Amino acid sequence: MKVELQVNGTRRVLDVEPRMTLVDCLREKLDLNGVHTGCEHGICGACTVLIDGEPARACLMFAVQADGYAITTVESLAPAPGELSVIQDAFCETHGTQCGFCTPGMLLVAHALLKRNPEPTRADIVEAISGNICRCTGYGQIVEAIALAARRLAGSNLGTEGG
Amino acid sequence: MKAAPFDYVRPATVEAACARLAADADAVIIAGGQTLVPMMAMRLARPSCLVDIARLAELQGIRDDGDAIVIGAATRQVTAAESATVAAKAPLLAAALPFVGHAATRTRGTVGGSVANADPAAEIALVLTTLRGSIMLREPAGSRRVAADAFFVGPMVTAATQGSCVTAIHFPVWQTGRIGVGFEEISARRSDFALVAAAAQVALDASGRCTACALGIGGACAVPCRVDSAGEALVGSVMSDKEIIDAARAGADALDIMSSPHASDAYRRRAAATLGARALTRARDQAARHGLPA
């Protein structure tokens, strides 16, 4: 089936089987391997992408359902190759990355949170990442990273677009 | 690819969707797919065809009908959670929505999908039962409105017939008194399935006496249960702590509770009494803080 996706700002027309999930489509057809395949039934959050700017599970959606939507993956967060976004940099600085498996999902929910709520409380941050499992249990540093990124974005003139 | 092969169609109208379902007994509706897709990944569900209703305009939107808030079946849970109309007129639903899945599933999951799925632990179904709401169904023979009490038949089983589609959900609006709500839930992890959930809505008169009271318990029984005995016991009272605890306990004692490896029936009964009392207390306190409606 033909499906048209706006992936990280680029229009992509693909031919997919209806049973291909969005996460498999992004990884296998578009080589966007930053979208991680974890539990594949909606529990872990590793496959989180933004659909029209809102976090969603790419394993809980078939690619055909996403026809016409704007998909944002972790690959689009950095402003240029070799650089890091403010949120990514904060994850590095606070050691919020650990093994890295949950990181793309964590970064995207953090990105969506700070766009909607530039001054989140600790409770807001915890709620925002509550659907994403870090098997290293590095939640403390992840919460710290998002709080640090929020402070830096608030103090910069980038706004969350640069987040 | 984990799911078994299937066809995918995106009909332009509810009528066309129903026709597709009527023509193929193994075709199923998909809206948000937040329950169906994992079922398909585990091959617990192997539909021949997915009929996608998520984008149908006639199934979208939140409308204030005066005596009810009417939510189109394919309205996303996040849309309801952010709706000022829901917050003002269906506060019990607003209180329950943060407990529905995770933020990243509420962006795709729909209000009608949760109801049609009829999971005994589902929060939206619990609110609907507690408030004596109803479900609009489009069936091959025409449309009909089904009361929540008649709609939920058993775990994942509803009164919807083959080839039918849930089109809207009616959440009743209470017209008089100072209204307060409470929603409480116990689950193993944040936003996991409720082992037990309690929903309460209370109306107080100017003197603080209870004029209306509804308590519902979810997760504990095969279907969401309204505890009418608690409501009847508390109407006319000032809802003292003791009256609330006694009413919630008596209500929980009368429930036909399920046991599962996750929680015994004895635990669920105790939790139902405790959460029911907490939800009623929260509802009472919230109502007491409100001024009378103009």
Image (cartoon, coloured by chain):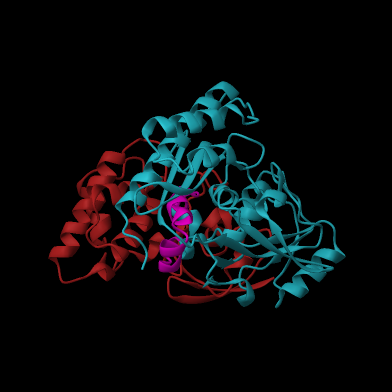
Residue farthest toward the left in the current orientation of the protein: A155
Quarter assignment of residue B141: bottom right
Q: Residue at x 46, y 55 (%)?
A: B104
Vertical comparison of B3 with B192: above or below: below
Q: Residue A86: give x, y in percent of width and height.
A: 23, 60
Q: Locate residue B21 relative to residue B210 in the image: left or right.
A: right
Q: Residue B57: give x, y in percent of width and height.
A: 61, 77
Vertical comparison of A38 with B64: above or below: above
Q: Locate residue B214 relative to residue A91 in the image: left or right.
A: right
Q: Is residue A47 a member of the stretch shown in magenta? A: no
Q: Residue B290: give x, y in percent of width and height.
A: 32, 56
Specify the colour of chain A: red
Report the magenta residues as a range.
B81-102
Q: Residue A77: give x, y in percent of width and height.
A: 34, 64
Tell me if I can see residue A117 in this picture. yes
In the figure, the cyan chain has which letter? B
